[in-house]
Image (tube, helix red, strand yellow):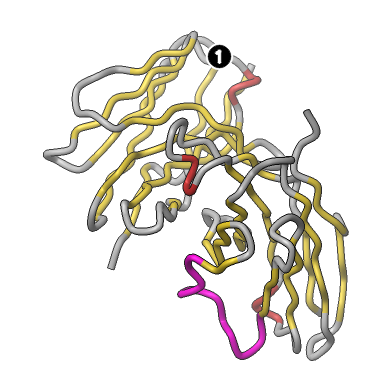
Amino acid sequence: EAGVAQSPRYKIIEKRQSVAFWCNPISGHATLYWYQQILGQGPKLLIQFQNNGVVDDSQLPKDRFSAERLKGVDSTLKIQPAKLEDSAVYLCASSKTSGGARTGELFFGEGSRLTVL
Amino acid sequence: EDKVVQSPLSLVVHEGDTVTLNCSYEVTNFRSLLWYKQEKKAPTFLFMLTSSGIEKKSGRLSSILDKKELFSILNITATQTGDSAVYLCAVQGLNNNDMRFGAGTRLTVKP
Protein backbone atom coordinates (compact mmCIF):
# COMPACT_ATOMS: atom_id res chain seq x y z
CA GLU A 1 0.00 0.00 0.00
CA ALA A 2 1.48 3.35 -1.00
CA GLY A 3 1.99 5.82 1.81
CA VAL A 4 1.16 9.50 2.05
CA ALA A 5 3.00 11.36 -0.70
CA GLN A 6 4.20 14.93 -0.29
CA SER A 7 6.10 17.32 -2.50
CA PRO A 8 8.37 19.13 -2.67
CA ARG A 9 10.61 17.64 0.02
CA TYR A 10 12.55 20.86 0.41
CA LYS A 11 11.87 24.47 -0.52
CA ILE A 12 13.89 27.62 0.09
CA ILE A 13 12.26 30.97 -0.60
CA GLU A 14 12.70 34.59 0.39
CA LYS A 15 10.24 36.31 2.68
CA ARG A 16 7.19 37.72 0.95
CA GLN A 17 7.37 35.06 -1.75
CA SER A 18 4.73 32.39 -2.12
CA VAL A 19 4.98 28.61 -1.88
CA ALA A 20 2.67 25.65 -2.37
CA PHE A 21 2.85 22.14 -0.97
CA TRP A 22 1.05 19.12 -2.31
CA CYS A 23 -0.18 16.01 -0.54
CA ASN A 24 -1.71 12.80 -1.82
CA PRO A 25 -3.14 10.70 1.04
CA ILE A 26 -3.40 6.94 1.22
CA SER A 27 -6.10 5.72 -1.14
CA GLY A 28 -9.47 5.55 0.56
CA HIS A 29 -8.54 7.75 3.50
CA ALA A 30 -11.32 10.24 4.06
CA THR A 31 -9.56 12.50 6.53
CA LEU A 32 -6.54 14.63 5.67
CA TYR A 33 -4.54 16.85 8.00
CA TRP A 34 -1.88 19.49 7.51
CA TYR A 35 0.48 20.03 10.43
CA GLN A 36 3.24 22.60 10.91
CA GLN A 37 6.26 21.40 12.87
CA ILE A 38 8.75 24.07 13.88
CA LEU A 39 12.18 22.82 14.88
CA GLY A 40 12.15 21.53 18.45
CA GLN A 41 8.37 21.57 18.74
CA GLY A 42 5.58 19.07 18.27
CA PRO A 43 3.35 19.16 15.18
CA LYS A 44 0.66 21.84 15.27
CA LEU A 45 -2.58 21.21 13.42
CA LEU A 46 -3.25 23.78 10.71
CA ILE A 47 -6.28 22.29 9.00
CA GLN A 48 -8.30 19.09 8.94
CA PHE A 49 -10.43 17.93 5.99
CA GLN A 50 -13.11 15.27 5.97
CA ASN A 51 -13.45 14.37 2.29
CA ASN A 52 -13.54 17.81 0.62
CA GLY A 53 -14.98 19.68 3.59
CA VAL A 54 -13.06 21.59 6.25
CA VAL A 55 -13.57 20.17 9.75
CA ASP A 56 -11.17 22.39 11.68
CA ASP A 57 -9.08 25.32 10.51
CA SER A 58 -9.05 27.26 13.77
CA GLN A 59 -5.24 27.43 13.92
CA LEU A 60 -4.68 28.27 10.27
CA PRO A 61 -3.35 31.85 9.81
CA LYS A 62 -5.91 32.67 7.20
CA ASP A 63 -4.36 35.99 6.24
CA ARG A 64 -1.50 34.14 4.56
CA PHE A 65 -2.26 30.41 4.57
CA SER A 66 -4.85 28.63 2.46
CA ALA A 67 -5.59 24.99 1.78
CA GLU A 68 -7.94 23.09 -0.44
CA ARG A 69 -8.98 19.54 -1.15
CA LEU A 70 -11.32 20.09 -4.04
CA LYS A 71 -12.07 16.51 -5.08
CA GLY A 72 -11.69 14.99 -1.65
CA VAL A 73 -8.43 13.28 -2.55
CA ASP A 74 -5.20 15.25 -2.84
CA SER A 75 -4.67 18.60 -1.19
CA THR A 76 -2.56 21.72 -1.53
CA LEU A 77 -1.38 24.10 1.17
CA LYS A 78 -0.31 27.57 0.11
CA ILE A 79 1.52 30.33 1.93
CA GLN A 80 1.42 33.81 0.49
CA PRO A 81 3.30 35.91 1.44
CA ALA A 82 5.75 33.87 3.48
CA LYS A 83 7.34 35.17 6.68
CA LEU A 84 10.55 34.11 8.38
CA GLU A 85 8.57 32.39 11.14
CA ASP A 86 6.94 30.09 8.58
CA SER A 87 10.19 28.12 8.36
CA ALA A 88 9.14 24.64 9.42
CA VAL A 89 8.36 21.15 8.22
CA TYR A 90 4.83 20.85 6.85
CA LEU A 91 3.50 17.38 7.51
CA CYS A 92 0.50 15.90 5.78
CA ALA A 93 -1.32 13.00 7.41
CA SER A 94 -4.36 10.91 6.59
CA SER A 95 -6.65 8.48 8.34
CA LYS A 96 -9.45 6.18 7.28
CA THR A 97 -12.07 7.64 9.56
CA SER A 98 -12.34 11.02 11.16
CA GLY A 99 -9.43 11.20 13.58
CA GLY A 100 -8.57 7.57 12.88
CA ALA A 101 -11.21 6.75 15.41
CA ARG A 102 -10.78 3.02 15.44
CA THR A 103 -7.01 2.80 15.68
CA GLY A 104 -6.05 6.36 16.54
CA GLU A 105 -3.46 6.07 13.82
CA LEU A 106 -2.58 8.89 11.53
CA PHE A 107 -0.35 8.01 8.62
CA PHE A 108 2.16 10.77 8.02
CA GLY A 109 4.01 11.75 4.88
CA GLU A 110 7.71 12.54 5.02
CA GLY A 111 7.05 16.26 5.14
CA SER A 112 8.02 19.33 3.18
CA ARG A 113 10.79 21.35 4.77
CA LEU A 114 10.40 25.09 4.16
CA THR A 115 13.16 27.60 4.77
CA VAL A 116 12.24 31.27 4.49
CA LEU A 117 15.23 33.62 4.15
CA GLU B 1 -7.05 26.10 26.25
CA ASP B 2 -6.18 22.48 25.59
CA LYS B 3 -2.55 21.58 26.16
CA VAL B 4 -0.20 18.64 26.19
CA VAL B 5 3.03 18.84 28.21
CA GLN B 6 5.83 16.32 27.90
CA SER B 7 8.80 15.83 30.16
CA PRO B 8 11.68 15.69 30.12
CA LEU B 9 12.34 17.63 26.93
CA SER B 10 15.49 15.63 26.35
CA LEU B 11 17.14 12.61 27.86
CA VAL B 12 20.49 10.90 27.32
CA VAL B 13 20.96 7.31 28.50
CA HIS B 14 23.20 4.34 27.78
CA GLU B 15 22.21 1.12 26.11
CA GLY B 16 20.45 -1.21 28.49
CA ASP B 17 18.99 1.55 30.64
CA THR B 18 15.26 1.84 31.29
CA VAL B 19 13.57 5.17 30.60
CA THR B 20 10.21 6.67 31.51
CA LEU B 21 8.75 9.48 29.45
CA ASN B 22 5.90 11.58 30.80
CA CYS B 23 2.91 13.25 29.21
CA SER B 24 0.34 15.35 31.05
CA TYR B 25 -2.65 16.92 29.40
CA GLU B 26 -5.58 19.24 29.76
CA VAL B 27 -8.21 18.76 27.13
CA THR B 28 -11.95 19.15 26.98
CA ASN B 29 -13.90 16.07 25.94
CA PHE B 30 -10.98 13.65 26.01
CA ARG B 31 -11.16 10.74 23.62
CA SER B 32 -7.73 9.11 23.54
CA LEU B 33 -4.00 9.62 24.07
CA LEU B 34 -1.49 8.48 21.52
CA TRP B 35 2.26 8.00 21.46
CA TYR B 36 4.33 8.40 18.31
CA LYS B 37 8.01 7.90 17.57
CA GLN B 38 9.67 10.41 15.26
CA GLU B 39 13.10 9.71 13.91
CA LYS B 40 14.37 11.88 11.10
CA LYS B 41 11.16 11.90 9.16
CA ALA B 42 7.47 11.35 9.80
CA PRO B 43 6.02 10.27 13.16
CA THR B 44 5.11 6.60 13.38
CA PHE B 45 2.34 5.31 15.61
CA LEU B 46 3.17 3.41 18.79
CA PHE B 47 0.12 3.21 21.06
CA MET B 48 -3.37 4.50 21.55
CA LEU B 49 -4.76 4.63 25.10
CA THR B 50 -8.36 5.25 25.99
CA SER B 51 -8.88 3.59 29.37
CA SER B 52 -7.16 4.19 32.68
CA GLY B 53 -4.93 1.55 34.16
CA ILE B 54 -4.71 -0.74 31.15
CA GLU B 55 -1.12 -1.20 30.04
CA LYS B 56 -0.34 -1.45 26.36
CA LYS B 57 2.82 -3.36 25.46
CA SER B 58 4.85 -3.83 22.34
CA GLY B 59 8.17 -5.55 22.85
CA ARG B 60 10.29 -3.38 25.12
CA LEU B 61 7.84 -0.49 25.02
CA SER B 62 4.84 -0.11 27.27
CA SER B 63 2.46 2.68 28.13
CA ILE B 64 -0.31 3.40 30.59
CA LEU B 65 -2.89 6.13 31.06
CA ASP B 66 -4.26 7.74 34.22
CA LYS B 67 -7.43 9.63 33.32
CA LYS B 68 -7.95 10.84 36.87
CA GLU B 69 -4.56 12.51 37.16
CA LEU B 70 -4.50 13.32 33.41
CA PHE B 71 -1.18 11.82 32.47
CA SER B 72 0.44 8.95 30.66
CA ILE B 73 3.87 7.38 30.76
CA LEU B 74 5.85 5.57 28.11
CA ASN B 75 8.41 3.08 29.34
CA ILE B 76 11.26 1.67 27.32
CA THR B 77 13.27 -1.14 28.89
CA ALA B 78 16.71 -2.36 27.83
CA THR B 79 17.14 0.64 25.54
CA GLN B 80 19.03 0.28 22.27
CA THR B 81 20.66 2.90 20.05
CA GLY B 82 17.78 2.40 17.62
CA ASP B 83 15.42 3.80 20.22
CA SER B 84 17.01 7.22 19.76
CA ALA B 85 14.22 9.46 18.49
CA VAL B 86 11.75 12.13 19.50
CA TYR B 87 8.75 10.62 21.28
CA LEU B 88 5.56 12.57 20.76
CA CYS B 89 2.44 12.41 22.87
CA ALA B 90 -0.85 13.50 21.31
CA VAL B 91 -4.31 13.86 22.78
CA GLN B 92 -7.41 13.39 20.71
CA GLY B 93 -10.65 15.14 21.55
CA LEU B 94 -14.21 14.17 20.85
CA ASN B 95 -14.80 17.42 19.00
CA ASN B 96 -13.83 16.70 15.41
CA ASN B 97 -11.27 14.17 16.69
CA ASP B 98 -8.48 16.71 16.26
CA MET B 99 -5.13 15.64 17.63
CA ARG B 100 -3.00 18.02 19.74
CA PHE B 101 0.68 17.15 20.11
CA GLY B 102 3.14 17.87 22.88
CA ALA B 103 6.60 19.25 22.15
CA GLY B 104 8.15 15.80 22.38
CA THR B 105 10.94 14.18 24.38
CA ARG B 106 14.21 13.75 22.53
CA LEU B 107 15.78 10.47 23.65
CA THR B 108 19.40 9.73 22.87
CA VAL B 109 20.70 6.25 23.61
CA LYS B 110 24.48 5.99 23.65
CA PRO B 111 26.31 2.72 23.00
Res A37 seen here: no
Residue A59 falls within the magenta-colored stretch? yes
Q: Nearer the viewer, residue B29 or B67?
A: B29
Q: Residue furthest left?
A: B68
Q: Chain of mark 1?
A: B
Q: Is residue B85 left or right of residue B29?
A: right
SS class, disc 1: loop
- Dividing the picture into quadrants, the one containing residue B41 is top right
Direction from residue B67 to residue A98 in the image, left or right: right
Q: Which residues are magenta?
A: A55-65
Residue A23: give x, y in percent of width and height: 77, 56
Q: Nearest the camera: A23 or B68?
A: A23
* Quadrant holding the C terminus of chain A: bottom right
Q: Position of residue A45 (x, y in %)?
A: 52, 62
Residue B52 in sight in this render: yes
Q: What residue lies at 23% left-to-right and 29% top-to-bottom?
A: B51
Question: Is residue A116 left or right of A46 when viewed as pictured?
Answer: right
Tell whether B30 sits left or right of A9: left
In the picture, the quarter occupied by the N terminus of chain A is: top right
Q: Residue at x 29, y 34 (%)?
A: B72
Q: Amino acid at mark 1?
A: Glu
Above or below, A13 against B20 in this view is: below
Quarter of the image where one finds residue B110: top right
Residue at 47%, 31% in the rendered image = A103
Residue for badge 1:
B15
Label 1: few (<14), some or many (≥20) within 10 Å? Answer: some
At a point 55% along the width and 69% down the height, the residue shown is: A54
Q: Principal SS element in the magenta part? A: loop
